[in-house]
Image: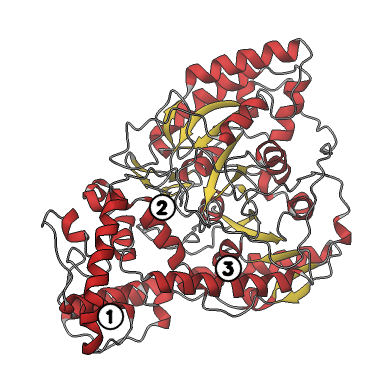
Amino acid sequence: MMDRRRFMEACTGLGLGLGSTLFPGVLWAQAEGKGAVKITKEMIDAAAAIADVAISDKYKEMMLDNLNEQAKGYEAIYGLHIPNSVEPALLFDPVVGAAKYETERKTARLSAAPNVSSSKKVEELAFASVRELAELVRTKKVSSSALTEMYLGRLKRYDSQLKFTVTLTEERAMDQARDADREIAAGKYRGPLHGLPWGAKDLLAVKGYRTTWGAAGFERQTVDEDAVVVQRLDAAGAVLVAKLTLGALAQGDVWFGGKTRNPWNPAQGSSGSSAGPASATAAGCVAFSIGSETLGSISSPSTRCGCTGLRPTFGFVPRTGAMALSWSMDKLGPICRSVEDCALVLSAIYGPDGKDRTVKNAAFNWDAELDWKKLRVGYLKSDFERIPQPQEDAEKEEPAASEEEKKKREEQRKKRAAFLERAKYDRRFADAALAKLQEMGVALIPVEMPKFPYDPMVVMLTAEAAAAFDELTRSGRAKLLTAQSADDWPNTFRSARFVPAVEYIQASRARRLAMDGVAAVFDTVDVIVAPTSSEQLVITNLTGHPALILPNGFRGDDAPKPPAKDDGDDDNIGGPGTPVSLTFLGNLYREAELLAFARAYQQATEFHRKHPKLT
């Protein structure tokens, strides 16, 4: 499979723009307003170069009738105007072999009731955990209405600085809060989320409010339903206070209203695409939030903002009512301030809904006192030992042809040098994590992920995303999106139209081999400790395994200074006072074990109790 750069070079070499009539994107020309175009032998030559297939002249004539007939079929399907909510007639299942998981639901076992002073002013509870807030609400020491007013006030106060809110759901929230107070007063307590204010990534539909997907051109979009996750949190008594930002169509932290910021350093973006949920949670503006991840969208902003984020197993939480980006990789999960918070939220949102056909009847039985010392714990030895390298280092540099090119190369070299300086500095946190685990009595087992060409498998994501937003691309409305660089969605969607169907299937077959390989690793351990930024991020998103990302320390005054401009390429640009993260990986649908172990580490380190000083 070609990478983006080779693809663009191939197109340039052939004298073709992405708006040309190249097969298999022949109808692209029609979308450009050039009228019906018939496929020719010359187009086959151009397409063959992209598909990396040699086709002799004697076969091209034989192909023309078939290809032109197929093109008519494409137009017929376009005429259906398929909405984003319609899934393909294919399902991704992360389970291979004889993997086992619990199906019997049991009552959650929470940690002991925390001792939280009721004499505190409500504002001083802004950074309290879900578990702490739940106990205060349950014992009527603080009302849901008071918490809701406090968090709404903070959302309004800090939004101009951090840009994390798309829409406040104030009227809905206050109605829910008053209902919660009445129910609790009457002895009808629904559980640990009852009365707690939360924020939804704005790819979750909420009836009566706009659902913008963070994208220009969708600012006024409404969906006449509540996403299933929203329905379930409503049923748990939680109070929705805001629709929070996401990078446009779930990429990065740039949305139609600007760039969402990192509360630890507002000069930096919050990363994405769950930009608003991470920023608002870290800033103490919601008790918890719901984000989504396809390839890093919970992990990245949780790292940048110092949150505790859970990316559940693929097929654990229903996505009904959520924007689709990649049907075989999308996952919804909580972004919180502690591991147990994630467990309490997951308890409320997981399980089949009868509509998302990927969701299994697996059970999540939270036990805060699970004996984690019985778990087999692996760690990615070579990933901890390796100093991350910037992508450019792997590419061969040709001699610079001009002064402008020399200047550009020099800037790239400086950028690489800064990257390496930051990576070497951050190495101390990874080493300290392993030392802390050993101090806790954990017998770390060195393991390695199987070696496969993982990045080319990501073509499945880009092809599915291009299909999910096909009409946006063909209509030309993709030009409305705020970000328009080579790495942004408009260009990715156009490029993905040239991925041959055969190569998509081959990537899927390679993905199955990877799934078998990773399953074999988890036959030997229950939990794996990993650097957040290592290749495991791509691997486990492809295989569907769960991940828990938690803060793992804060850079000191001696930390390398961050770049003057945050270009969004690196979650660890850091700077003094900013957080670093650590990732724990679990087996499929075994979040109970994963979270119990991660909670033990979090209790031993307590980095999650720090919060940014906002002005």
**Residue position for label 3:** 539
Q: Pinpoint residue 532: horizontal percent, then vertical percent.
A: 59, 63
> From mark 2 to mark 3, how far is it between C-alphas?
19 Å
Task: State which tag comes first along the sequence, 1 or 2.
Answer: 1
The reply to whether discs 1 and 3 touch (Cβ–Cβ < 8 Å) is: no
Q: On the image, numbered disc 2 is attached to which residue?
A: 251
Among numbered discs 1 and 3, the one appearing first in the sequence: 1
> Label 3: few (<14), some or many (≥20) within 10 Å?
many
Residue 561 visible in the snapshot: no
> Position of 279 compared to 444: left or right?
left
Q: Total label count?
A: 3
Give the x, y percent position of residue 397.
32, 86
Residue 261 figure quarter: top left
Pick whichever of labels 2 and 3 is earlier in the sequence: 2
Location of mark 1 (residue):
48
Q: In what quadrant of the picture does the N terminus appear?
A: bottom left
For badge 3, the amino acid type reads Ile
Mark on residue 92?
Answer: none
The three-letter code of the residue at mark 2 reads Gln
Identify which residue is drawn at 35% across, 57% down.
565
